[in-house]
Amino acid sequence: MKTAIELREACARGERTVIDTVTEALQAAEARKGENALSYIAAEEATLRARALDALPTSERKGRLFGVPIAVKDAICTSGLPTTSASKMLVRMTSEGPRPYRPPYDATVTERLLAEGAVIVGKANMDEFAMGSSNETSAYGPVKNPVDPTRVPGGSSGGSAAAVAGGIVPVALGSDTGGSIRQPAAFTGIVGVKPTFGRVSRYGLIAFASSLDQIGPMTPDVQSAARVLEIIAGPDGRDSTVNGASVPGYEAACLLGRKEGLKGVRIGVPEEYFSEGLDPRVRERIELILESAKKKGAELRPLRLPHTHYGVATYYVLATAEASSNLARFDGVRFGRRVEQSGTSLTDLYAQSRGTGFGPEVQRRILLGTYVLSAGFYDAYYGKAQRVRTLIRRDFDQAFAEVDCLLTPTSPTPAFKLGERNQDPLSMYMADVYTLPASLAGIPALSLPIGRIEEGGSLLPVGLQVLSPFLAEESMFRISSALEELVRELGL
Amino acid sequence: MAISVDEVRTVARLARLALDEARVEELAHELGKILGYVDQLNELDTSNVEPTLQVGTLSAPLREDVVRPGLEAVAAYREAPRTSPDGFLVPGFVDESSGKKGGA
């Protein structure tokens, strides 16, 4: 399928109509319904908008995503379109049947993409409240990996990944709290970017863990991701955690990277990401890329990030603590599900609405978070994890004093089978072992597809993770584009 | 790290989650296993390490306090399960402490 950049050029020049472009996306969405990538197909809304865009004179077809069909993760507010974080908690029972929450406003990211001429064709399925690594916790049912329908697409942005990998849309928005953009990108063979913490406004993102959540693009290619990030990044008066730094030209950085290649780039190779638990075929593939980069003039520096191993434990204390607080807003009063019988007290209304609205993984995390924050355990768990988070950050600070980027596998294994891990929370949490540290440190990271490996008759994608210093997305895009060229040259 | 069914019940009450008894037992087992894994953090001496609360934000930025248009009440009520023209409707709760059953 065409990239967002190619589609935008064709639509802006009038070489193809937006309605044709959008109709193709809607047809693909219908044809691929079995994969369950979209929790809502916005056929009517997208068609109306496409017609309106087609009616514009050429002089007004300037948007950087003019006519481009996109999917938006169901955790991100889209005015008038269902937004439920794939949870029954945000579906209210009415006399006409179940009604998903439809927000009265757009998230900042949604607003910015629409202002550039994008057309929302659907909401992307996801793990409930973004809690999961396989997209199996969704109230809408699991998403299947377009590469192999017996396998998971990763999570939590599994629907966004499957919508792009399955060719429904050339751009999807995901959100990443501990790897939720990068791991599904790796599992489905696309590009996924988790920006620096504070780079993108979260206004209108249904919060999971506020010190970690970031919204980012998922696309088939690096340059489209750069364009989307350039649009959505930067200060927003509605989210005080957004970094005030100006947004550099990420797309220009891609062009530069393709031109200048990897010569002189100092690549750090952290030992801890190549240890026990890494699939040997994934390792082999990453090593091939590293060796090829070296031949192109990059300098490889082995180094250590000694606290990597503690990332999973640190994350599951901090993220659940923050989630237990953030999810308190779902109380059955202002929106979503409400369960009460006559004579139900207010506290029972809360408890029954939440007890039946939240799925098992969300309940587990709320309870864990409430436990680690409760009197008597706060210092031992929450306080301790905050201190270990400092150690993990320092590991990266020391590494980036010596190198321009770090290259690692995005995930220790390729996509696993549906149902393979969802009975054991800890084995599921380990799927994020290579993505969690960057989230805890707040640094930007990109997953790049580097070809496929054969398993049981399927060809499964492998992702390379490019980790960069705080706010160094420009350098990350430059290096990633050069690596993308290298992958192409190698024929992977 | 073991966690008792009573502890799960207490935490569930604090978190306002109504759970059935079978689930409480499962959760005691699951949470115990996860907390057991988390205990590895104690291998690290962090007595001289500052906690990280948030990355990259040293202080909250301030802006002028000016009145700006907000959401219309009618739009805010539109998604609520029960409303009156004056607001969201909830069961009476002021007399809960005087004997009426509360909590999960």
Image: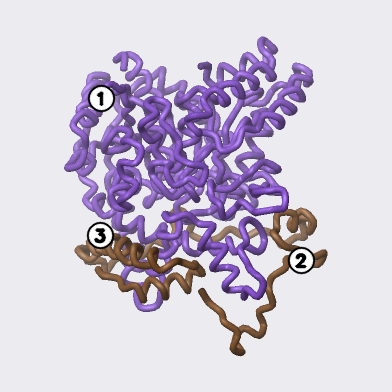
Chain colours: A purple, B brown
Image quadrant holding the N terminus of chain B, namely bottom left
A341 left or right of A221?
right
Foreground disc of the pair 1, 3: 1
| In the foreground, A291 or A425 | A425
Q: Position of residue B100 (x, y in %)?
A: 60, 84
Q: Is A308 placed left or right of A133 in the picture?
A: left
- The amino acid type found where label 2 is placed reads Gly
Residue on which the image places disc 2: B87
Host chain of mark 3? B
N-term mark: 3 or 2:
3
Q: Which residue is mark 1?
A: A456
Q: Dot 1, how many residues are within 10 Å of its Cα: few (below 14), some (14-19), or many (20+)? A: few
Q: Which mark is residue A148?
A: none
Q: Classify mark 1: helix, strand or loop.
A: loop
SS of the residue under disc 2: strand
- Does residue A293 appear anywhere in the picture? no
The residues bearing labels 1 and 3 have C-alpha atoms spaced at a distance of: 32 Å
Return the residue at label 3: B37
**Amino acid identity at mark 3:** Tyr
Residue found at the far bottom of this picture: B98
